Image: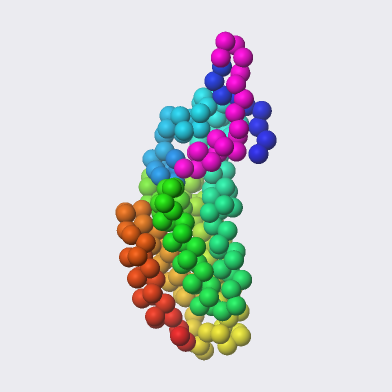
Amino acid sequence: MECSATSTKTRGRPREFDPDAALGAALQVFWKHGYDGASLAELTEAMGITKPSLYACFGNKEALFKKALDLYERDKLAYIRSALEAPSARGVAERLFKGGVETYCGASESQGCLGVISLVACTNEDSSIRDHVIARRQSSEAALVARFEEALADGDLPEGTDPKVLAQCLTTMLQGLAIRAQAGAERADLEKLIAGFLAMWPGR
């Protein structure tokens, strides 16, 4: 991303910083603490910039968080697009679970789901952030419903299956896995839960 902001000043000369690297660092702070739990002091320290530089380059904290969400969805949730292209409805679920576990249980990065963490941690004062995260989640769920409607029309799902309910069950399961991962659950434990869910898949 382009940005003309600078970080700290040394003997009157501004020191340039890499906005992309700074945004990546901010993402890690938000991912660990959620929107409400991430303080400006923690963000600027992790990003290696001053508050004026943060405001000049990224806007306020809310704008920074939205940019971090964009980065998170682009780099960490790319598996969702791949999942929607799976040849079967069950394949969609399997790819989502695999990608989710890889994201939630990354060995070197924050665990859990940024969206879920932020929703749980948001206060009433952060209603605009909550609404923004919910809107993004609803968009993803709508795409999943459309995919399952297609599967139903193709006979890939049994007659009588409700695509919306199935999509909601799947996203609720993914959110639960994210919360468990954030609480320290082992990958093997999450995979057992996934196997149990898939055992109940319609038309298995």
The x, y position of residue 201, in whole percent, is 44, 80
Q: Residue at x 50, y 38 (%)?
A: 25
Q: Is residue 79 magenta?
A: no
Q: Quadrant of residue 151?
A: bottom right
In x, y percent, where is residue 72?
54, 50
Q: Is residue 125 visible?
A: no
Quarter of the view holding residue 202: bottom left
Image coordinates for residue 89, horizontal then vertical, percent:
54, 78
State whether residue 178 is above or below residue 34: below
Look at the image and tell me in which quarter the N terminus lies: top right
Count the marks: how many? 0
Q: Residue at x 62, y 14 (%)?
A: 13
Residue at 45%, 85% in the rendered image: 204
Front position in the image: 22 or 53: 22
Residue 141 visible in the snapshot: yes
What colour scheme does the image use? Answer: rainbow
Where is 168 relative to 204, above or below?
above
Q: Which residues are magenta?
A: 10-28
Please identify the residue farthest to the top as the structure is shown: 11
| Residue at position x 43%, y 71% in the image | 169
Q: State yes or no: residue 26 in magenta.
A: yes
**Residue 132 screen position, x and y as percent:** 52, 50
